Image (spheres, rainbow, N blue to C red):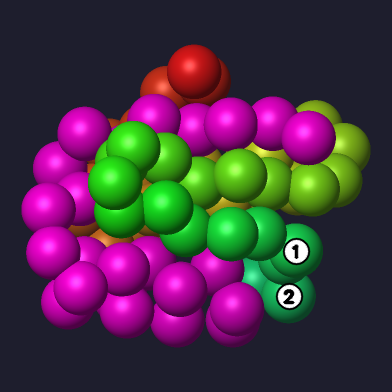
Amino acid sequence: MTVLKVPDMSCQHCVARITKALEEEKLSFKVLLDSKTVELEGDEAAVQKAVAALDDIGYSSERA
């Protein structure tokens, strides 16, 4: 599992946008608002898809 920090995630609306974007990429993940993180299952290609999807909707991310 890879954990991505998403510091700009601040509310349930953010969670919904992130969830939608990652579901569209068919990724296995869990969005955690309290810690402002996304727990991501998969290989490096999945991580890169997630980072790109987050960037596309305006959220920066980095590995925790």
Residue 45 appears in the rendering = no
- Residue 16 on the magenta span: yes
Residue type at mark 2 is Lys
Q: Is residue 46 above or below residue 64?
A: below
Q: Is residue 12 above or below residue 53?
A: below
The secondary element bearing badge 1 is classed as strand
Quadrant where the N terminus lies?
top right
- Residue 51 image offset from top left, x and y in percent: 50, 42
Which residue lies at the image location 32% right of the left edge and 79% below the top edge? 16
Compared across the picture, whether 14 is left or right of 53 comes to left
- Classify mark 1: residues with Cα within 10 Å, few (<14), some (14-19) or many (20+): some
- Residue 33 image offset from top left, x and y in percent: 30, 53
- Front position in the image: 32 or 22: 32
* Residue picked out by circle 2: 26
Compared across the picture, whether 47 is left or right of 17 comes to right
Residue 47 appears in the rendering = yes
Residue type at mark 1 is Ser
- Residue 57 on the magenta span: no
Residue numbers of the magenta segment? 1-24
Which residue lies at the image location 50% right of the left edge and 46% below the top edge? 38
